[in-house]
Image (spheres, rainbow, N blue to C red):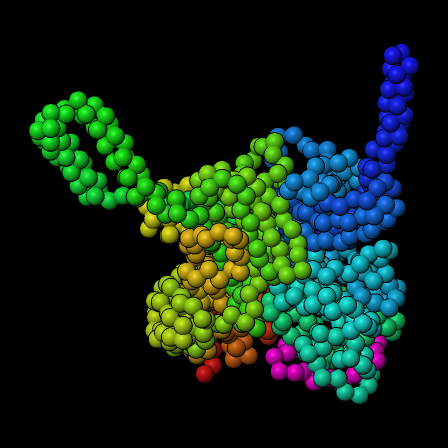
Amino acid sequence: MHSRLVAIVASAILCGLFLLPQASLAAPNITVDASAGLQNKVKYEKGLPLQFTLTNNGSAFSGDLVLSYSESYSLGAGLAVPIELASGETKTIQVASTGLSDMSYMASISSQNIFLFEGGWKEGKSIKYNGSKTLKPNYFTPMDLFIASLTSNSDRLQQLKEVSAGSSGTPQLFHLNQMNQFKLPTEAVAWEIVDYLVIDEFAYSDLPDAVQQAVLQWVQQGGHVVVGSTGNLSAELGNLSEFLPLDIGGPLEAAVPGLEEQVPAFEATTKDGAKILLEDKGQVLAASRQIGSGTLTQTSFSLGDESVSSQKGYPKLMSGFLQNTSTLNANFQGETLSERMAYQVGEVNELFESFAVSKTLIMGIIILYILLIIPVLYVILKKKDKREYAWFIIPAAAILTSIGLFALGAKDRIGNAQIQQTGFFEVDANNGLNGYYINSLLSNRGGDYQFKAPASTTMSYRLKSQMTEEEPHQAAILERQVAGNSMTLRDMRYWSVSSIMGESYIENTGDFDVQLNVANRTIAGTITNNFPFAIEDVSIWTGTRLMSLGNLNPGQELQVEETINSDILAPASSVGQPYGYQPIADAKALAQARRQSLVTISYDELEDKGTAPYVIGYTKDAIVPISLEEQRASVSSLHLIAQSFKPETALSGNITLDAETFNMEVTSVNQQAYFENVSDDPYYYYFDDGDYEITYQVIEAIDTKQAKWEELGVSLATSGPAISIFNAKTNKYEEITGSRHTLDKQVEQYISPEGTIKFSLEMRAGASSAPEVALPKLKLKGEVAP
């Protein structure tokens, strides 16, 4: 007996010794190295590439890497990447994110936002690993200029570090194909971090098709490419070659304005649709062409040849091609577009219609109930001598009636999930729609809901509350796939609301055919709807006024004849009427609130804001290509469609140009000085100490060559920094004092032949009561020859 017990114990020990090492060997042993953006630099509000290098020193791993990230205080999700990692294998994976931020309202700061789930994020378990637990990039504002290059030699473009972008941002230069262990992104959203891509004598056509397609899609959605000319440029530029703005001829020596010496160049002529940016004595030196919402700029000379880039004027020359059009969108005290979209549009979009049963029907049911329960039921039960049944018939009837009323009022919520889709889109040069949307879901059951969208439509989750212990990946998971992307809203409660926000580009949609002219303070002509969907409440947006014209079915033409208050049609200006916090009593008020929120928020994102009037309208078609999978849903859509236009303007005789008819640009003389527009008022700015230049430009509707200016009025704030106007004749600035200043003698000294008026502003500590300043407002009077 004793020997048998010893044998059993010995066998158990041997089995344990044999099994324990196997259990240890069966576990993956993974090390993760993570980086974000370009050289670990990222920009708020911009998409970016993420790179993960995983090394497995244990057994094979199959599952998901999940990054739990925030784009802003209000947006975030978990980004899931499928991983198959054999024992001893090292793998580098690149994936795109729609944004990354260190902003968070979480109740506690998480020490980990990178997770490994063995078996997948749905059913698997989180395992421990070594290495990077979080992403720790350096953050930059949207105003910081990010220039990326593709060049055969990075030394050729080092002077680009010296460009002045005309904003308070700091230029950052990245030679993408020279960066160590960096793969060019194959997703368009990853290229959003780049403001300009400079291609310098590089075989772009040799890049993988996926990279070229991503770059083209990025340009269509607002990206910018700058390329110098070579003898074989069309063959070198791959899928971008068809968009080149110049036809190149033979070689020559060209005098480039801004450069001290002549440079080797090519004869050049512009193609259809190209805009000349630089020329000298009839020789075209640079031109650009619109591609969707973006541009391709081409020079007739090389960008990196030493004879060009070594000249002192090169940084200033390139600054003209690399103007940063990004802004902080700081009309709401520095809040980003996503933040304003989340509360200004999102809070309204998440309001669904309440249960609705007509008062007449309710009264009818109550009367019928009283008649049936009291006299009819009494008579029937008395006749059958079953009056004791009333004790359960009356409560049962009351319960059934209540259930019936509830089911009648809530039939829409019970039958299907409900979706409200709201967005704003601008028509680009190629009849595409580029814009932003928010998709709110009211659930009709508990559990997960999955949405799918193509790669041209991004998705981010609107976080529930500002103070929460919930990690973003616990609320929503984004998965990137070859055919598109999917987002799963996790563990939604019954009759709860969740929202997805994002950007979408919809190709070849259509446009408004605008044939309008302005004469004698009247705008007249036609607007035709070339979209495949109906447009409601078509309006002309001029200044802060919305001129309502009517509705348009597909292909329908609208006759226009409206009186305006000036000789020209002013560019669109911020309406600045937030709808927030006003009571919404019924479905009509809800629809109006959705429309008003779109008008208010869309202005800052319009391509030609402040420079052209717009035709706008609303469609109720669900134009955003996002769909709820494996379930039907009732969809209510409302999208603002906007398109800029330039009316034919007939001017002669005396004219008066008010403040709204000038385009204004603010730049810092010393690059490090910071400024921003901090109000709905486009003239109200915050300035750091420093020197600034304010440029006013008469809009293109005025032929300045036919104009004779007679009086310039300048309105200033009662107190503020020193402001001076530039006198072109003396080449000096003259200080302006007082709240109103009128120049009525030799006015042409202050207005260039191109219609430009310049001011300087000196902000000094203690010189004014506050760093916020109201900029000058102009009124210009003159006469235009017929």
Q: In which quarter of the image is residue 736?
A: bottom right
Q: Give the extent of the magenta segment.
A: 257-277
Q: In which quarter of the image is residue 491?
A: top right
Residue 709 at least partly seen: no
Q: Residue furthest top?
A: 2
Q: In this view, does 263 lie to the left or right of 371?
A: right
Residue 515 at least partly seen: yes
Give yes or no for residue 262 being in the magenta stretch. Answer: yes
Q: Report the quarter where the N terminus lies.
A: top right
Report the label total.
0
Q: Position of residue 593 (x, y in %)?
A: 40, 50
Give the camera-side residue of 181 and 344.
Answer: 181
Q: Position of residue 462 (x, y in %)?
A: 55, 44
Give the camera-side residue of 572 and 712.
Answer: 572
- Give the residue at x 86% y 19%: 8
- Give the residue at x 37% y 70%: 552
Give yes or no for residue 503 being in the magenta stretch. Answer: no
- Give the residue at x 47% y 81%: 785
Q: Residue furthest bottom?
A: 250
- Give the residue at x 59% y 73%: 754
Q: Is residue 207 left or right of residue 578?
A: right
Q: Is residue 316 above or below residue 760?
A: below
Q: Is residue 368 above or below residue 550?
A: above
Q: Where is residue 659 in the image (x, y as percent from the top left)?
A: 48, 61
